[in-house]
Amino acid sequence: MNTAQVLQLNLHQQLVGYIIGFHNGKNIVLFDQLFRDNPYRPTLSLMTAPQFPHSEQLLKKDWV
């Protein structure tokens, strides 16, 4: 059985996305579309800051 736990990520009252943790140790971060498309999004990390080079490409993919 492959079960998972989900944690909703919010930053400054804005939905960032979800972290999904599987019991086999795999974790996935799924970014919300509105967070990805917001050029004024709050900074979750320096890599997700709108000013960071290629941040749009980094947010298009789920992080595993």
Image (tube, rainbow, N blue to C red):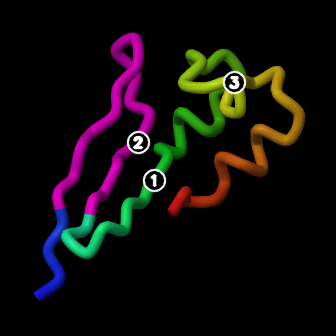
**First of labels 1, 2 by sequence position:** 2
Quadrant (top left/top right/bottom left/bottom right) for the N terminus: bottom left
Q: Are circles 1 and 2 on residues that touch, CB within 8 Å?
A: yes
Label number found at residue 17: 2
* Viewer-proximal residue among 42 and 27: 27
* Depth check, front residue: 30 or 27: 27
Work out how far the residue at label 1 is from the one at label 2, CA to CA, in angstroms: 5 Å
Element assignment for label 2: strand
Q: Is 16 covered by the magenta stretch?
A: yes
| Front tag of 3 and 2 | 3
Nearer to us in this view, 25 or 18: 25
Which of the 4 quarters of the picture holds residue 47? top right
The residue singled out by tag 3 in the image is: 46
Q: Which residues are magenta?
A: 5-21
> Residue at label 1?
30
Q: Give the residue at x 34% y 49%.
A: 19
N-terminal of the two: label 1 or label 3? 1
Q: Name the mark on residue 4.
A: none
Going by the numbered disc 3, the residue's amino acid type is: Leu
Question: What kind of element bears circle 3?
Answer: helix
Q: Residues within 10 Å of mark 2 (few under 14, many from 20)?
A: some
What is the three-letter code of the residue carrying label 2? Gly
